[in-house]
Image: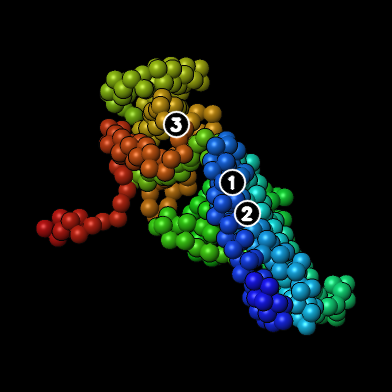
């Protein structure tokens, strides 16, 4: 046995191989026994912190320190190569610590992203810039260890390269400033519906990183936009609609102006059978008659005095119908108005809000409302305006 020991002592390379083998065996034992034991313990805990640390490989990366530390402590056994082995293992330990810190930051970011606070403020970009700074400093430390120079000496040389570094890291710097603007001004957050026409994006924000913002469009495609470009562009955030609890209906019915006229007594009696108009017509007819009587109006001519029109009565019907609709939000803007006539007819604009924000349900509500209104237009002696079709021209020819 002594012969073998003396033989190993006389051969530096063999000593290094033995040392490396012992370190590797200890590393395997630590990884398979210690790490597996830690995983079993963490599974029994209720906190997610330890689970995330395991998932991100924090403890695995720390385990790399064990063989490196052993080799470093026994570097004096390799006199010709002691300095190189010592520096190499120190550099390796610095890299392992750097990787472990990156895993720690990833774990913190994952834990935060799953918390309720993530919806209010996204900090992923801050972690990315922190990791960038950490990796730059870590690289300087590793180079300093290998070269035998002081890190301060290397940092002093970076000052001369400031212009080059500014050019190289231009996009990260611009994106970092943009990320600060996004979070400080609460411009948008994950889950918001953004409409960015200049960049061809229209959908939900699914990720906000240092360099890019990911938007899932309604056709399920993903638009990846540089953060600083998104800030430079104009965009619409629909979050206010979701928070208000209502979604806007803004649509017009175009009526044929030739169908507008005064209501006859017979027509008014017929319209009184509409439950939504009964109270309105009784009050309005009484008001009109009282006004005409007080001013001694000659009612033989239709142009004299005040009279009810079919379009005014129809507008009152729309208002009553929507006021009694269970899906209309009566606490938000509610407006039924007549716009300026055009070559397309007289527009009656409906400007109201539903009390739901779900897109599919909203479209169904809007369709039901206009199905009903289009169906009742003829009951008021009115006609919907539309451009002539081939069938209309065929009637003229025949």
Point out the frontmost of discs 2 and 3.
2
Residue topped by disc 2: 59
In the rendering, at what x and y percent does residue 208 appear?
60, 56
Quarter-of-image position of residue 144: bottom right
Q: Earlier in the sequence, mark 2 or mark 3?
A: 2
Q: Identify the element where label 3 is drawn.
A: loop
Which residue is at 54% across, 29% downward? 331
Asked if the residue at tag 2 contacts the one at tag 1, i.e. Cβ–Cβ closer than 8 Å, the answer is: yes
**The C terminus sits in image quarter:** bottom left
Q: Gap in Å between the C-alphas at discs 1 and 2? A: 9 Å
The residue nearer to you, when weighing 162 against 280, is 162
Looking at the image, residue 172 lies above or below residue 114: below
The residue nearer to you, when weighing 78 against 194, is 78
Residue topped by disc 3: 328
Q: Residues within 10 Å of mark 2 (few under 14, many from 20)?
A: many
In the rendering, at what x and y percent does residue 306 appear?
45, 27
The residue nearer to you, when weighing 365 against 396, is 365
Which residue is at 54% across, 43% downward? 40
Q: Gap in Å between the C-alphas at discs 2 and 3? A: 57 Å
Q: Residues within 10 Å of mark 1 (few under 14, many from 20)?
A: few
Q: Gap in Å between the C-alphas at discs 1 and 3? A: 57 Å
Looking at the image, residue 30 lies above or below residue 121: below
**The N terminus sits in image quarter:** bottom right
Q: Identify the element where label 2 is drawn.
A: helix
Asked if the residue at tag 3 contacts the one at tag 1, i.e. Cβ–Cβ closer than 8 Å, the answer is: no
In the rendering, at what x and y percent does residue 265 appear?
31, 23
Residue topped by disc 1: 38
Q: Identify the element where label 1 is drawn.
A: helix
Q: How many marks?
A: 3
Name the side, left or right, on which 249 lies relative to 147: left
């Amino acid at each position: 046995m002594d012969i073998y020991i003396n033989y190993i002592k006389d051969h530096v390379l063999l000593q290094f191989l033995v040392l490396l083998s012992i370190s590797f065996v200890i590393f395997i034992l630590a990884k398979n026994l210690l790490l597996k034991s830690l995983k079993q313990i963490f599974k029994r805990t209720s906190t997610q912190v330890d689970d995330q640390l395991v998932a991100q490989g924090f403890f695995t990366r720390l385990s790399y320190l064990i063989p490196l530390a052993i080799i470093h402590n026994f570097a004096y056994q390799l006199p010709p190569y002691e300095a190189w082995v010592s520096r190499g293992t120190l550099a390796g330990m610095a890299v392992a610590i750097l990787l472990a810190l990156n895993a720690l930051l990833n774990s913190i970011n994952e834990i935060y992203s799953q918390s309720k606070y993530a919806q209010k403020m996204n900090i992923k970009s801050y972690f990315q810039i922190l990791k960038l700074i950490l990796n730059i400093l870590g690289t300087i430390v590793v180079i300093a260890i290998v070269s035998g120079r002081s890190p301060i000496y290397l940092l002093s040389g970076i000052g001369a390269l400031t212009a080059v570094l500014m050019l190289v890291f231009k996009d990260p710097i611009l994106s970092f400033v943009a990320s600060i603007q996004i979070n400080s001004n609460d411009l948008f957050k994950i889950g918001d519906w953004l409409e960015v026409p200049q960049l061809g994006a229209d959908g939900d924000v699914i990720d906000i990183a240092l360099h890019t913002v990911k938007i899932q469009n309604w056709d399920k495609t993903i638009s990846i936009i540089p953060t600083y470009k998104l800030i430079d562009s104009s965009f619409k955030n629909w979050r206010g609609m979701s928070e208000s609890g209502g979604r806007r209906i803004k649509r017009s019915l175009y009526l044929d102006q030739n169908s507008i006229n005064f209501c006859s007594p017979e027509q008014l009696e017929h319209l009184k059978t509409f439950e939504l108009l009964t109270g309105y017509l009784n009050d309005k007819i009484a008001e009109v008659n009282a006004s005409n009587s007080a001013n001694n109006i000659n009612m033989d001519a239709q142009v004299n005095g005040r009279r009810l029109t079919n379009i005014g009565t129809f507008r009152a019907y729309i208002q009553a119908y929507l006021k009694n609709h269970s899906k209309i939000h009566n606490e938000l803007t509610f407006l039924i108005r007549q716009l300026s006539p055009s070559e397309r007819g007289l527009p009656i604009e409906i400007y109201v809000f539903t009390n739901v924000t779900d897109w599919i349900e909203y479209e169904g509500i809007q369709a039901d409302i206009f199905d009903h209104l289009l169906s009742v237009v003829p009951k008021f002696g009115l006609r919907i305006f539309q451009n002539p079709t081939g069938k209309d021209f065929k009637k003229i020819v025949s």
